[in-house]
Image (spheres, rainbow, N blue to C red):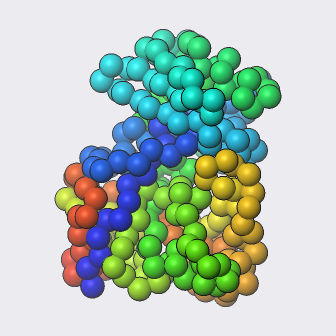
Amino acid sequence: MTGTVAWISIAPVKALGLVQLREVFVDEFGIRENRRFYLVDAGGRFVNGKRLGSLVRVAPEWDEASETLALRLPDGSVVSGRIELGGPLLTNFYGRPVPGRFVDGPWDEALSALAGEPLRLVLTDIPGDAVDRGRGGAVTLLGAASLEALARAAGLDGGVDGRRFRMTFGVAGLPPYAEDEWLGRDVAVGEAVFRPSGNVGRCAVTTQNPETGVPDFDTLRVLKRYRDDVPTTEPLPFGIHADVVGPGRVRLGDSVDLSRLTTWRA
């Protein structure tokens, strides 16, 4: 079976809005611009969308070549400038240390006002470090048919917006949950080769509307009702995460070539 790339999404600033792209270069650590920045609170603790869902209303734009970051706020105003790095910070990301540096500039004030609490912007020292699973899950994939099956299971007349799951790549043209069968194999996606290594277990972020950050769909209840007994590496699975074993360029419409899948041993 052969599918096609249906979407490409990244989040230059973790917890803020997604950016939809037509093509990316996928390196061994993932997409360089993805999760390049993250936020911490006044105590230096990592902040994500589960805690401050309204931050998803901010649209980021990061140009690494010019080192320029622009944030479009919900009122339409834009806060932008060339980043300047401040002091170092070591942040706990789900039990693993991620080194970075504070970013000096106008973004902290704007984001703090929106969140209603002090926030600081941080740039990771190493690209790829701020994805949830670190270098053990450089990219994520989800089938478009799996989204359709979720909508049917929930009894929805319309579809489910895939952005609420914040997956890197969507795959069209395959049966529902076909991606679950890729674990332990290699798959060619465009010019890159991924090695799926586990299911993505879902959390409360997926209940939030991807435009507003307000909970509006009980994703976890639906997944538990009809996906609780499937074999999985994480509870409430929906989509998979993968390592990159062959860097390369991926474009919308590129093939997801299952004929090149090969078994492997870790």
Question: Is residue 139 toward the left or the right of residue 152 in the image?
Answer: left
Residue 186 in percent (x, y) is at 30, 71
Where residue 197 sits, quadrant-wise, is bottom left
Question: Is residue 254 toward the left or the right of residue 9 in the image?
Answer: left
Q: Residue at x 54, y 20 (%)?
A: 79
Would residue 20 be seen by someone viewing this image from the given angle? Answer: yes
* Marker count (numbered): 0
Residue 120 in percent (x, y) is at 66, 23
Q: Residue at x 65, y 60 (%)?
A: 206
Q: Quadrant of the N terminus?
A: bottom left
Q: Quadrant of the C terminus?
A: bottom left
Position of residue 65 relative to residue 202, above or below, is above
Q: Residue at x 33, y 79 (%)?
A: 173
Question: Is residue 240 toward the left or the right of residue 151 in the image?
Answer: left
Residue 222 in percent (x, y) is at 71, 78
Q: Nearer the viewer, residue 161 or 98?
A: 161
Q: Residue at x 41, y 86 (%)?
A: 175
Position of residue 222 relative to residue 78, above or below, is below
Q: Nearer the viewer, residue 49 or 198?
A: 49
Would residue 181 be seen by someone viewing this image from the given angle? Answer: no
Residue 131 in percent (x, y) is at 52, 47
Position of residue 205 relative to residue 146, above or below, is above
